[in-house]
Image (spheres, rainbow, N blue to C red):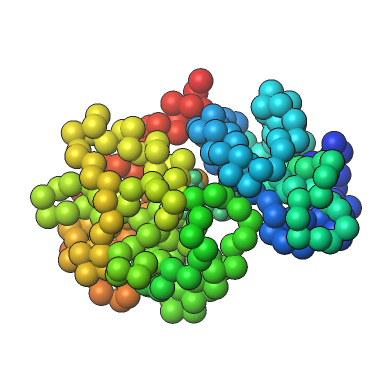
Amino acid sequence: MSRIAYVNGRYLPHRRASVHVEDRGFQFADAVYEVIAVRGGALIDEELHLKRLHRSLGELRIAAPMSDAALKSVIREVLRRNGVADGALYLQISRGAARRDFPFPPGIEPTLVVTAQRRRGPSTKQVEEGVGVVTLPDIRWRRPDIKSVALLPNLLGKQQAREAGAFEAWLVDRDGNVTEGTSSNAWIVTAAGEVVTRQADTSILNGVTRLGLIGLLAREGLTLVERPFSVAEAKTAREAFLTSSTNFILPVVTIDGAPIGNGYPGSVVRRLRQAYEGHVAAQGAA
Ligand code: PDD
């Protein structure tokens, strides 16, 4: 099946799907995006993604291109035309196309692009054996809570991680605390069994998977603590893991090459992965 993209009102084959050379997303990264997991034909936590999308748009004062009801039908049509029941839905909204100039051009129409891809999640080996992360300075701007397409520091960090043989890079602020991964949120489990992740202020993206998991913790009888944690604390934690829409929950078993605990995924992360899969399956069945 050839891939189809939605671009500003039209469903087009990928090879013909393009935006204008003066689109501000292309020229200035003046755009926001969302990645939504699709399982069993269902969009996982779609409402939370749309809520975050509106927050990102609002922070950057970009107009919504259409109502949520219309956007939801475009999203479903893209999934249908691409035959994607298990995979990821990508949507991007830029401020629009106009003659290149820094201030917001008046009367500009936002650009909307929606694409879908089949599942390319983590391997069974990564889920069962865990992955490694390296730590790098967080060199991003001070508003990574806005899900903008300005991802250059994230790409550089991910590439550096891959070149070091690691799956992800955990970004570290000036105080030596982990903010988050380049495309995921960072978590540890302390010796006391508390589940710790950084508070969702302007220093991290408030992950939808993060929010979904927080909703499950109490039911699992686990205590959540939202606070910063240092690289040193993470390295001596009982367990560590990461969350994102493309990976759900993945155990982290090494940090900068040093094993966490005994170097194998711990009981808490395994339990949480299972609980999260239940959360996903429940939406697919709905
Ligand atoms: N990334 N932090 C950052 C910097 C991210 O880019 C992401 C998601 C997350 C996790 O958010 P969520 O649980 O809502 O996926 C945290 C997406 C998957 C991406 O850019 O591909």
- Quick check: 175 left or right of 30? left
Q: Which residue lies furthest to the top in this view?
A: 286
- Image quarter (top left, top right, bottom left or bottom right) of the N terminus: top right
Please give the name of the residue rendered at 32% of the width and 75% of the height, measured from the top-left corner. Answer: 256
Residue 262 point in image, percent of width and height: 18, 65
Please give the name of the residue rendered at 17% of the width and 58% of the height, measured from the top-left corner. Answer: 238
- Quick check: 88 left or right of 21? left
Please give the name of the residue rendered at 32% of the width and 52% of the height, measured from the top-left corner. Answer: 198
Quarter of the image where one finds residue 133: bottom left
Quarter of the image where one finds residue 22: bottom right
Q: Residue furthest left?
A: 192
Q: Tell me: residue 106, above or below residue 18.
A: above
- Quick check: 141 left or right of 193? right
Q: Can residue 32 be seen in this view?
A: yes
Residue 261 point in image, percent of width and height: 18, 64
- Quick check: 190 left or right of 272? left
